[in-house]
Amino acid sequence: MSTDAHSALTPRWVRDLERLLPIRSQFIVAGNIRDHFLAPLDDGSLTPVPLVRCLWSALQRQDCRFLLIYDPVGGLRPYPNEPPAVELATQLFDLKLQDGAMPMSLDSLSGVMQRLTRMREARCALLVDFASRLVRHPDQLDAGEHRFFLAAERLAVQAVPVMVKNRMPREPGPLADNKPRFNPVLWLLNRPQDLPSWFALDNARVESLTVGLPDFETREAAARSYFTLFRQMDEAGPGERDKFARDFAAATEGLPLTALSDAAQLADRQGIAFRDVEDAVQCYKVGVLENPWKKPYLRQRIAGAAEFIETRVKGQQQAVTKSVDILMRSVMGLTGAQARSGGNRPRGVLFFAGPTGVGKTELAKTLTQLVFGDERAYLRFDMSEFAEEHTGARLLGAPPGYVGFEAGGELTNAVRDKPFSMVLFDEVEKAHPRILDKFLQILEDGRLTDGRGDTAYFSETILVFTSNLGIYVEDAQGRRIQNVQPGDSYATVESRVKGAIADYFKYRLSRPEILNRIGDNIVVFNFITPPVAERIFAGMLDNVVSRVREEHQLELELEPAVRRELMARCIDDLSNGGRGIGNQLESLFINPLARALFGLDLEGRQRQGGKLRVAEFKESEEKIVTLGLA
């Protein structure tokens, strides 16, 4: 690899450190500090190493002879743990090492800092590791802690760059020039605010370096280091090795380099071949190796999906066809195929819109049954419960420092527990707009981090949103009017509902980006038509007959005239869809049937194993329905 390529893959914070050593005495290094970083080996190749080793490689290029590392538990120790470095550090700083380290108080550490910044015998540096844990509360210091940080701030201002007396060539790389530069103090922090807020305020000698997540090129270069951990590597040609590195880097977008190492270790233990590198990443993310999306039985189920769905969701052919298309796309691994990073997105996204009671939630349950074999595998969130902004803490987890943040969020916890699931967000338009913003990250990146810092991955889920948007709209006077109604053609219903949904997200919420990420996955349901209503009524009535048979061992029969009258009453008003049919059936038939069965049971006339015929359907002036039983 060329020198220019090496330089491009060197972490930005390392390049900034080397550039600023002549003018900065202290550095706050914060962010992704527990990750691995690319550092050069003796043969010129790059390999992922921990931050301390990467930092040491950079300091060596600046003629540094050793590095002192302090942490609140272990004390002070020289690095690297090699005789020349340890002997020189012990001599210059009068170290009394016990098991390679020297216990030290903050006052003693202040003395080490002063000695280090004035050192001319050898160039060296001090790294304060776990600096986020030096004090309990950075803005509530006791006297000793305040004295320590005040001394460090004063030292940052008063330190001067020095030239060393005895320079020794160090490998690798050319010897740095002998111009004056600081012997730096580096603070290793999770977050910059873990130090007192006043420490670096208006202090030009203290530089903050942000350690970010690796980019695609860095992950691609690191991926080559882990190729040997995958099976069948001996069969790979140069082109396949390059493809492996690209696929590995693409699948780990947004993750640290340690994630690549962990995924490769899992692949080694699970015996995953290099061609299945995405399975290794999936195993790392969701903790499950068995992927139901790749099982042969799922393709067989989806092949007959339309007939299976029709038994439960009637009269919604257009919605069923589009939903099955999205399932097929998910099974074939083509979700987001048009985008470079599409592999991290959810397996499928469905936005079910239409009148109430037409089968939106029922279709979500049916798809869950189809894919996962159990309709209870879906995770349902009633978004009307999240109408206030503060309720987002329930769904996604409270921010750090707030009560309950350690519990995580209901959504993130559920997806971590069941990474292969259907996630249903019912009546999504009732959620607070700030909560809807969180869906941007889920729809684009397929991940969400809760208040504890734990990440839930949605890459193996199907997201289903249901909504009644577009059925009613506001007119110019702000009155709520019906936008579509029974009898309209499906083309009219679909066009008007989609238009109303677009207006809602673009103009009312001012969040067109959410609509853009949902894309063409809006599935509009039609009104229940009379022929479909008759089939729904028949299915519900059959369910009642089956329940009577199971509970009372009685065969329930209805006279044709009774059945016709009952059906006519139940499907007379279809404005509430199938749910309205069920409500009418409950009032007109199930309630009087229960009353009649209860009376027979009290009289001891109910016979198990017999037949019960409904011969008459009567309604009094008081609207009380009774059944004539025979």
Image (cartoon, helix red, strand yellow):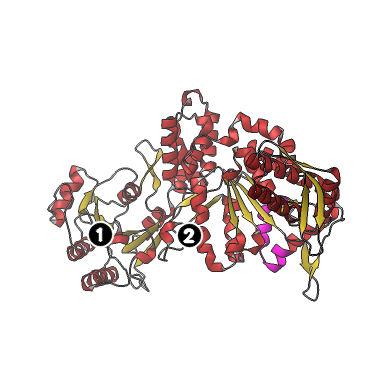
Q: Is residue 599 left or right of residue 27?
A: right
Looking at the picture, tell me which residue is in the foreground, 331 or 317. Answer: 317
Report the residue marked by disc 1.
163
> Which callout, 1 or 2, points at the residue further toward the start of the chain?
1
Looking at the picture, tell me which residue is in the foreground, 328 or 177. Answer: 328
Q: Is residue 171 left or right of residue 537?
A: left
Instruction: In the rendered structure, find residue 408 and report the number of the disc placed on it.
Output: none
Residue 405 in view = yes
**Secondary structure that dominates the magenta span:** helix
Residue 269 position (above or below residue 474): above
Q: Are marks 1 and 2 in contact (CB under 8 Å)?
A: no
Identify the magenta region.
504-522
Looking at the picture, tell me which residue is in the foreground, 276 or 464. Answer: 464
Q: Quadrant of residue 47?
A: top left
Type of amino acid under label 2: Gly
Residue drawn where x is 14% and y is 54% of the image: 95
Q: Quadrant of residue 486?
A: bottom right
Q: Residue furthest bottom?
A: 477
Horizontal and vertical percent for residue 189?
35, 59
Residue drawn where x is 17% and y is 59% of the image: 104
* Image quadrant containing the N terminus: top left
Horizontal and vertical percent for residue 437?
59, 61
What is the spatial separation of the Cα atoms under label 1 and label 2, in whole angstroms? Answer: 52 Å
Report the residue marked by disc 2.
397
Q: Quadrant of residue 480?
A: bottom right
Residue 91 position (above or below residue 45): below
Asked if the magenta segment contains residue 398, the reply would be no
Residue 148 position (above or below residue 133): below
Q: Is residue 32 left or right of residue 588?
A: left
Residue drawn where x is 66% and y is 48% of the image: 603
Q: For label 1, count other residues whose C-alpha is less than 10 Å away and answer few (under 14), some (14-19) or many (20+).
A: some
Type of amino acid under label 1: Met
